[in-house]
Image: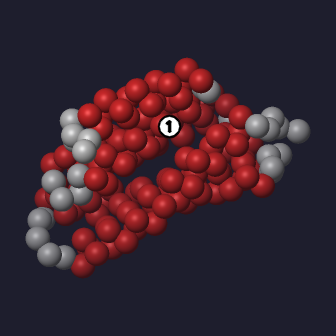
Amino acid sequence: MIKYTYVPAAVLATSATVGIMTTPFMGLATLAYGAMICGYWERKNRKSHVRLMSFAIFLDLALVITLELRREAIETAISMTFGPLQQAHIFFSLVATILYFPILFFGFYLWKNPGPSPIKTWHIRLGKVAFFCRTLGFFLMFTLLCQTKN
């Protein structure tokens, strides 16, 4: 059985490996996704869940902003010059990114107001959809290595 203390080390090692084998942006995306997995794993421990998910979401948002500033990502995505798998990556990543905002809002509300609430139900539902979209976007991200823009 794997001890929980080994999970963060495995996430960091995987992120470093992906960053070395692909691009630094993909390494950071892997780190964010790994933190998100750890945050989902820790969903029963509020303090750890909030820290890990906040880190993952803010790293993802910082990565999106960086890609826009350095590579004009929005203009590239709108130009539709990528293939279907790469466009699917953009779509699922966009949906996850949009969902981060209500998830963060609901999450911070719940942090300040613990206890049963209909907001908790929506936080969980939106979180699951965002995590699903982020998972698809993460794995489809690697198709960007296979195709360059036309």
Residue type, mark 1 in image: Ala
Q: Position of residue 43 (x, y in %)?
A: 24, 57
Q: Quadrant of the C terminus?
A: top right
Residue under the image location 23 percent in, 52 percent down: 42
Residue 20 lies, with reference to residue 49, above or below; the image says: above
**What is the count of numbered marks?**
1
Q: Residue furthest bottom?
A: 118
Q: Position of residue 92 (x, y in %)?
A: 59, 57
User: As rendered, which of 58 and 11 lies closer to the eye?
Assistant: 11
Residue under the image location 42 percent in, 35 percent down: 31
Q: Which residue, given by chain and number where applicable, does mark 1 sit on? A: 29
Q: Residue furthest right?
A: 150
Quarter holding residue 5: top left
Horizontal relation, residue 124 to residue 24: left or right:
left
Q: Position of residue 32 (x, y in %)?
A: 42, 39
Residue under the image location 44 percent in, 43 percent down: 33
Q: Is residue 129 visible?
A: yes
Q: How is the image coloured?
A: secondary structure
Q: Residue furthest front?
A: 1
Q: Secondary structure at mark 1?
A: helix
Residue 20 lies, with reference to residue 89, above or below; the image says: above
Residue under the image location 62 percent in, 43 percent down: 141
User: As rendered, which of 14 and 126 lies closer to the eye?
Assistant: 14
Horizontal relation, residue 76 to residue 118: left or right:
right
Q: Is residue 98 visible?
A: no
Q: Quadrant of the N terminus?
A: top left
What is the crowding at mark 1: few (fewer than 14 residues within 10 Å), some, or many (at least 20)? many
Q: Position of residue 8 (x, y in %)?
A: 30, 34
Quarter holding residue 108: bottom left
Horizontal relation, residue 137 to residue 4: left or right:
right
